[in-house]
Image: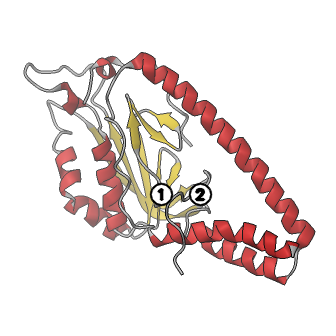
Amino acid sequence: MDDPVDASPRWRRALARSPRQWSLVWRISVPVACACAGLLATTSMVNARGTDLRGGRHSDLIELVGAQRQEVAELRQETESLQQRIDGLTAEVGGDKVEAVQEQVDALSTPAGLEAMQGPGIVVSLDDAPDDQEVPEGVNPNVFVVHQQDIQAVLNAFWAGGAEAVSLQGQRIISTTGVKCVGNTVVLQGVPYAPPYRIVALGNVEDMYAALTNSPEVANYRSYTAPPYNLGFEIRQDVNLVVPAFTAPVQLTFAQPAG
């Protein structure tokens, strides 16, 4: 898994841019319902909300990175504590109904993205122009960096091509994942990452490759990989890639199971 980004900017980032058993059964059923709701939208497009990928007041960014890391650490600690409570209650109560619910949870874990997956797939890497890249007179400096829409273009092409599991920067992407950009970084699950952006997709290689080739948005990005822009784009196939499990809490605030 990739390490979180150091907040120190490079030259191009300095530019401003744009009875009790039933109670236990209910507790366990809630995650099942959440997983079902997420599964229904597995092939949905990636959430587009967020600020510009290369915006830039860096003093604010440093404070934001620190706050986000602290929040992520607290949430992970809370998740571990809650999971220990669930495991303890399950072991104490047991029973056929609890076991039946647990079987449902286990069955939904894989399609909901809660299990690590491996198999054939494609790796795409996107990167900003080289550090020593000169900006020709009259050319907008923003064209020399990877933007949020470029990452989304590749992710959406993979989904359109039938990808069964996808990761970005070593983090699993599921239906509720939002690719949000803050300052000079992309933020996933509250942790900021810097380029190059490595996207891994498992599935039918021919179908996914065709979807990448036929995507107008990906084609537009690739048109800037030649001089004088020199954005980075690498693509390769592999017969045995690994996509990790989604480890963040799966929480739905507004959507509820129907029926």
Residues under numbered marks 2 and 1 in contact, where contact means CB atoms less than 8 Å apart: yes
Left or right: 201, with 35 as reference point: left
Work out which quarter of the rendered image holds the N terminus and state it: top right
Foreground residue among 186 and 219: 186
Is residue 227 visible in the rendered structure shown here? yes
SS type, badge 2: loop
The amino acid beneath tag 2 is Val
Can you tell which quarter of the image residue 34 is in? bottom right
Which residue lies at the image location 34% right of the left edge and 49% below the top edge? 48
Left or right: 14, with 108 as reference point: left
Of all residues, the one furthest to the left in this rendering is 138
SS type, badge 1: loop
| Disc sitting over residue 250 in the figure | 2
Of all residues, the one furthest to the right in this rendering is 92
Q: Is residue 222 above or below residue 158?
A: above
Foreground residue among 88 and 195: 88
Work out which quarter of the rendered image holds the C terminus and state it: bottom right
- Which x, y percent locates residue 95? 87, 79
- Which x, y percent locates residue 169? 48, 44
Q: Is residue 162 above or below residue 222?
A: below
Of all residues, the one furthest to the front in this rendering is 19
